[in-house]
Image (spheres, helix red, strand yellow):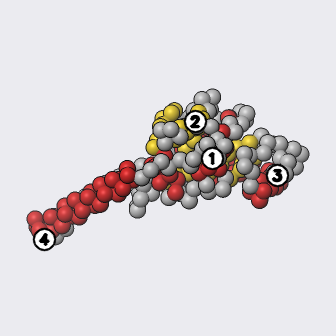
Amino acid sequence: ASSTSSRSSREPGGQAGLMRPARAARAVACAAALVLAGCAARGPQLPPVAAAGLPASVELESTPFFPQQDYQCGPAALATVLVASGAQVSPDDLVAEVYLPGRKGSLQAELIAATRSRGRLPYVLPPAFDDLLAQLAAGHPVLVLQKTGAGPWPGWHYAVVIGYDASRDRVLLRSGTEPRLEMSATRFRATWDRADRWAMTVLEPGQVPARADFGRTMEAAAGLEAVHPARELPADPE
């Protein structure tokens, strides 16, 4: 996660110069209002769960919650899915492995490596909403990357999806300092889309992810085998 800051500047030219940014700000505000209105007019964003054979709603209430410290959503989110898989770890244990002070954040490669080092299978999901929902229906919380900002303030943020409610078009997350953040599917999809729909679930060795993609499952298994050769690998997905 990252913080945002505002900058003020004065243009030469007295009041006329000062009016130009004011007009620009109003134009941006109007454009933003139009975008929001367009989003509000859209239909449901969650995939049709009945057709996909998924329950109408899921909430993984037993998923642990670790409120993030400054800029440290990566360690907090990773600890959440690791503990949910049965590993014994805390965000503090992960900071040195996954948090990059220079970037004030964590990269996906570090999260994957830290997961393997604790004997767990990091399965990176296909970039599809129904695959994410399928993991939740199977009881697996999903770590996601979101881009909540834009431009010079991208707002990269890791959170953990713990459920959804198709009738209300809502997604439930452990996010930041919020143990149960309820977000519209429209907003979630927009922030997830801007982060290229990156998502990962963490499994015990021998478990197969829901709707397992063969190539992704074998890649995850090979990575774990390289770190822990004695670990039991998941069976080939059908």
Crowdedness near tag 1: few (<14), some (14–19) or many (≥20) residues, C-alpha within 10 Å: few
Q: Amino acid at mark 1?
A: Ala
Q: Quadrant of residue 143?
A: top right
Q: Is residue 72 above or below residue 8?
A: above
Crowdedness near tag 3: few (<14), some (14–19) or many (≥20) residues, C-alpha within 10 Å: few
Ranked by sequence position, the earlier of labels 3 and 2 is 2
Mark 1–mark 3 distance (CA, rounded to whole Å): 21 Å
Q: Is residue 121 above or below residue 216?
A: above
SS at badge 4: loop
Mark 2–mark 1 distance (CA, rounded to whole Å): 14 Å
Disc 2 marks which residue? 57
Mark 4–mark 3 distance (CA, rounded to whole Å): 70 Å
Ranked by sequence position, the earlier of labels 1 and 3 is 1
Ranked by sequence position, the earlier of labels 1 and 4 is 4
Disc 1 marks which residue? 51
Disc 3 marks which residue? 238
Determine the residue positioned at 68% across, 36% down. 139
